[in-house]
Image: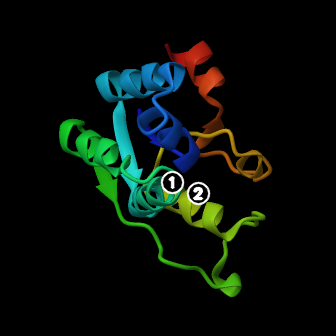
């Protein structure tokens, strides 16, 4: 499966070193295709620099050691061009990328994603991923 993570999940796994989320991330890397979108990667570095200066090295290490496919995201979107509605414009960019790149599963804890009525990608929490795919 092609699996993408929202920023908050990757940040908790990589920078905050969540054992639970790291286990899920490792499972995805070992058994599926991890897809990272450019928007999420940029946001990861921005959040790390702002909230935990010096932790950017954890991200550099992850990026250099893990196998993943990097895909480009929109930089911004105009309301007239939107193909679905979601409260947060930043979330729109992430979900739009997941749709365009034919992602099978998007893992997130962000409730805004669950409000969108789409068939693919399957939007699930880390717990749902663990319960159904591990």
Q: Which of the 4 image quarters holds residue 45?
A: bottom left
Q: Residues within 10 Å of mark 1 (few under 14, many from 20)?
A: many
Is residue 25 shown left or right of residue 120? left
Is residue 58 shown left or right of residue 104? left
Is residue 40 shown left or right of residue 91? left
Q: Position of residue 79 (x, y in %)?
A: 70, 83
Residue lying furthest front in this view? 53
Q: Is residue 85 above or below residue 53?
A: below
Q: Does the CB distance between marks 1 and 2 fall below 8 Å?
A: yes
Q: Position of residue 49 (x, y in %)?
A: 44, 58
Residue at mark 1: 98
How many callouts does the rendering have? Answer: 2
Residue in the foreground of this view, choosing between 84 and 109: 109
Q: Position of residue 2 (x, y in %)?
A: 41, 39
Q: Residue at x 52, y 36 (%)?
A: 12
Q: Residue at x 59, y 80 (%)?
A: 77
Is residue 18 shown left or right of residue 114? left
Residue at mark 2: 95
Q: Secondary structure at mark 1?
A: helix
Q: Is residue 105 visible?
A: no
Q: Is residue 72 above or below residue 1?
A: below
Residue in the foreground of this view, choosing between 47 and 134: 47
Q: Residues within 10 Å of mark 2 (few under 14, many from 20)?
A: many
């Amino acid at each position: 499966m092609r699996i993408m993570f929202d920023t908050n999940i990757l940040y908790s796994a990589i920078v905050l070193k969540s054992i639970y989320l790291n286990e899920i991330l490792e499972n995805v890397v070992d058994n599926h295709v991890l897809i990272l979108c450019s928007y999420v990667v940029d946001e990861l570095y921005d959040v790390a620099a702002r909230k935990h200066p010096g932790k950017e090295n954890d991200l550099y290490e992850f990026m250099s050691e893990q196998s993943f496919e990097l895909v480009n995201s929109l930089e911004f979107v105009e309301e007239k061009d939107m193909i679905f509605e979601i409260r947060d414009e930043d979330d729109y960019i992430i979900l739009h990328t997941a749709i365009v790149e034919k992602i099978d599963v998007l893992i997130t804890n962000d409730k805004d994603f669950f409000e969108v009525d789409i068939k693919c990608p399957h939007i699930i929490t880390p717990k749902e991923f663990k319960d159904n795919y591990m």
